[in-house]
Amino acid sequence: MIEVRGLNLSLGNFRIQNLNLTVREGTFNVLLGPTGAGKTLILESIVGLRKIQGGQILIGEEEVQHLPPEKRGISYVPQDLALFPHLSVEKNLAFGLRSSPNDLLKDGSYLARLVETLKIEHLLQRRPHGLSGGEKQRVALGRALAPSPRLLLLDEPLAALDPALKDEIQQLLISLHRSLGFTALHVTHDLDEAYLLGGRINVLIGGRLEQSGQREEVFLHPRTLEVARFLGLRNLFPGRVLKTGGAEDSTTVSLWGRKIVIPSSHSAKSVSPGEEVILYLRPEEVMILRPGKPVKEALRGNIFAGEIERILDRGTHRWVLFRPSGLDVHLEVSLPNYVFRNLGLQEGQEIQVAMRRESFWVIPKK
Amino acid sequence: MNSGKTAILAAISLFLFYALLILSLLTFLEGPRFLEVLSAPDTLFAVHLSVIAATLAMLLAIAIGLPAAYALSRFQFPGKKIVDTLLELPLIMSPVALGAALLVFFNTPFGKAIQEKGVLFVFEFPGIVLAQFATIAGLATRLMKTALDEISPRYEAVARSLGSNAWEAFRKITLPLSFRGILSAMILCWAKAVGEFGATVMLAGTMAFKTETMPIAIFMSLASADIPKTIILILILAGIGLTALFAVRLVEKRPQVL
């Protein structure tokens, strides 16, 4: 296990204070945050390229914050890959190894397997400058993994790739991780990339680790408004807590003049009556009711009538902008294309929408 | 006339200016004396002394300038801007003033102690090397810093993460990648040292067959009003310098590996 405990460091006016981060052995972790959040600073501290002002970095039981980079056993892939341009691919791969490449590339060896998995056998004698973007990515990954590092740090290595190549390398990373089982911490600001790669996601905003958890937990249940906003979540509505607890262990929140009863487990933190909160409602969880069809019991409490203001074709799905009657708010509804076609919706149409109480997520405002 | 043509015209004018200078030398050139002067013992001594002293001064400037250039290129430290500015002092200060400063230094108690208990510099061969070193060290550091600035520190960072210590990362990665720039710096500084006069004449004097470098030989033959010999010596010195500059062009022209 790799642990960062109480990390303190500063660069100019930017500070990271008392940051804690845990990376379990054999897992693929993502450090997700906007540009300027301090992701690279943390990565450079872990690898040993930047001096920390306080805290501990532990690999297993060993404290490594005082060790130089070469003694930490942490491989690092920067955004520009930094393949050594004067060395062949073979020599790049063998750079972190003490034996000659010929010995290491023997059939059945770890490096031979790695080269085979990365599909770079035909590139071994070439220099990096003649390689394509994808080939360079593969070589950089191979070079970093060749010494079997205790931790692999990836600093936005896919940021400059076009979508098709990015997809290819993401798939490669997933399959490499499955077959080799290394421990990785991948830095990115790309939400899709984080969701695809990250078993565990750590959200860093303004030098603070706002949330750590499994990817579903982070994306579906943001703990703070900052995380929700950074994740680009829609349907964030201000409300006020009216009541907590009770026989059903629920939280009652006022929203648009209605009382919404939400299970207490669907709250980022415990809230108190009178507290201002934000209600998050996933656009995929909003249901459009068919006129004349019976409504399920679970939906009856939260039905809103209103008008479709706009419909956007997003390719894979339709984005319906719904305005509840008499209110100056908009609720975004995401519908799969086949559902949209079945419903035959049009802009300006009067409809009813409903949501289950479990579809709401309560986020404290402060 | 467009700006491109104006610029080309300016370049041609500059070339003609220097060509005219060289051609004017040929007016007084006595062809039959060329081989005689070239093979004369004092000329051979001056060429030999210049080459040896310039090579030593250049090696010394590289040996000290390379770590300095690395520090200026890679690290932030207090007083970095002051150090960086001081490096340019030899570029703007007259070599005569630099030589005078060295001469004054060797008249201070510390300088005298060095002379008495260590190495004799004033009017001696080490003085030539020191004067040339003082003239080129700043330039060598500046040129090598530029070469190192072009190499991303990320290469070293990755090398360190792959198990190389700081020296190994420099030796295996940064040095080979910046080698061409460093080689250019070596050649340029060597050529500048070969042609150095002001500081050398102040510290080492003008002693025939002792401190007589090529520029000093030119000065001495001009002082004795032997114009044809002076011109031949100038042409020899210009030949050495131009060969060095051409070598720099060859080094720079090779295809990049980056």
Image (cartoon, coloured by chain):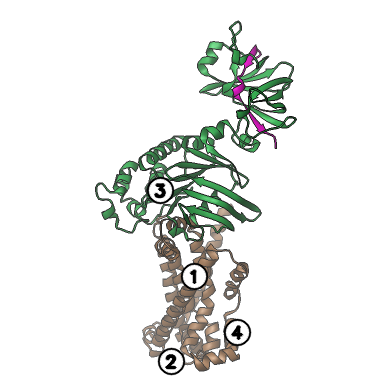
Determine which residue is flagged by label 2.
B209
Residue B92 versus residue A301: which sits nearer the camera?
A301
Label 2 in the same subunit as label 3: no
Q: Assess whether mark 4 and mark 1 are in contact (beta carbons under 8 angstroms).
A: no
Camera sees residue B130: yes
- Mark 3 or 4: the one toward you: 3
Determine which residue is flagged by label 4.
B101
Secondary structure of the residue carrying numbered label 4: helix
Q: Amino acid at mark 2?
A: Phe
- Mark 2 or 3: the one toward you: 3
Q: Amino acid at mark 1?
A: Pro
Determine which residue is flagged by label 1.
B67
Spatial separation of the CA atoms under disc 1 and disc 2: 36 Å
Label 3 in the same subunit as label 4: no
Quadrant location of residue A328? top right
Quadrant location of residue A133? top left
Q: Earlier in the sequence, mark 1 or mark 2?
A: 1
Segment tinted magenta in the rendering:
A347-366
Q: Chain of mark 4?
A: B
Per the rendering, the colour in which chain A appears is: green
Q: Assess whether mark 3 and mark 2 are in contact (beta carbons under 8 angstroms).
A: no
Q: Chain of mark 3?
A: A
Spatial separation of the CA atoms under disc 2 and disc 3: 60 Å
Q: Is residue B146 above or below residue A152?
A: below
Residue B163 percent location from the top left of the image: 41, 58
Q: Amino acid at mark 3?
A: Ala
Determine which residue is flagged by label 3.
A140
Q: Which residue extends farthest front?
A: A247
Q: Earlier in the sequence, mark 1 or mark 4?
A: 1
Secondary structure of the residue carrying numbered label 3: helix
Label 1 in the same subunit as label 3: no
